[in-house]
Image (cartoon, rainbow, N blue to C red):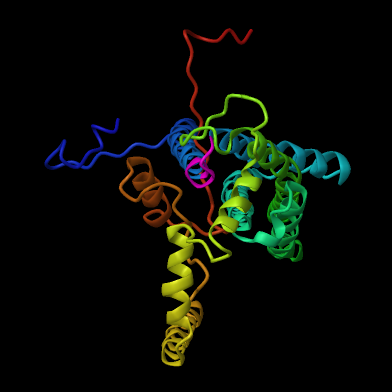
Amino acid sequence: MDKQSDPETHATLNSYYFMTAIIGDVILDIVTQDGLLALFSFAFVFCWIRLNTGSWFLAFVGFFEIFFSIPVAWFLFTVVFQIKYFSTLNTLALFIVAAIGADDIFIFMDAYKQSQYHLDILTDLETRMSWVYRRTGTAMAITSATTCAAFLCTLITPLSSIQSFGIFAACVILIDYVLVMSLFCTAVVIYHDRYESRAKCGCCCPCGVQTPSVTENAKAAIEANDGEEMKRDRVSEFFRTKVSSFVQKPLNRLVLAVVFLSWVGVSIWQATKIEPTKENEQFLDENHPLQKSISILDKEFPTANDDIGMKVYYAWGLGLVDRT
């Protein structure tokens, strides 16, 4: 049918098709294609976590922690809060937690990596992880709380599907924060004791506890450097030397402020031009044959509520009906 409805198939005839029964098949095909794209996005998140942490072990634990927050949040949503309505929009929380969960992992690992440059907290692993835990816990608690509050603002809408999505997304973000500060933190301790300096590729084979530990080696490296500040990774050095020096100049700050205010002004101006929709929204591409048929039915055959409809009956069979 798609070939027959192609404008290039017939030179003098435009062909369209429409049938309610095939709408489900078309939507299912679109969902299948989007699902494959979703798998690609999840694979990208996993690879990015692996690149940032430098460990297959932490990448698998982090990826598991992100998606394990979905069933735990579902239990909290349906069993604890006794909310029976589960909106289709709630499935979008999977993509939201994949992004926010990866950000939380990056924040935790960044604090863990930065801790190796502070001599006063390298006395033992407990002191070091306490510093990391307090540093990241506060920052992620604030960002997670604001995100949850933003989703809970959907409770002001009378639409039950939007309310359900907001509550479920807030539960997912809360559970993700709890798992990062518990499960992933435990994984980092195991990573420190067993895997961190085993291999450059992030060996994940249990080879016993490392002696001396990575923390002890970091402390010895700082002491051997006569207390001078050690060179950090390239990203940290870039922000410490290039970005910070750029922002500290008054003229540069003024330029950034003007650019930011201009952007806000343009955004507000464009927001004032938003108007309510005046026609039915298209759920398919405008060039899709089925969407062309739907658009023709909506625009070329207008009807009013008081129009008198005509009922048409079709009867068929294999033979005469015995009415005796």
Q: Along the horizontal axis of the image, is 95 left or right of 244?
A: right
Quarter location, residue 153:
bottom right
**Where in the figure is residue 320, as x and y percent of width and height?**
50, 9
**For residue 176, above or below residue 135:** above
Quarter the C terminus occupies: top right
Residue 122 visible (yes or no): yes
Residue found 49% across the figure and 63% down from its top: 236
Residue sitting at the far left: 11
Give x and y (percent) for residue 289.
32, 41
Residue situated in front as seen by the camera: 295 or 96 = 96
Q: Which residues are magenta?
A: 49-55
Look at 63% across and 57% down and name the residue there.
115
Q: Nearer the viewer, residue 291 or 62?
A: 62
In-front residue for pair 29/207: 207
Give above or below for 64 relative to 220: above
Count all numbered tags in the image, as a single digit. Answer: 0
Is 139 included in the stretch rendered in magenta? Answer: no
Horizontally, is 320 left or right of 136 in the view? left
Q: Is residue 159 visible?
A: no
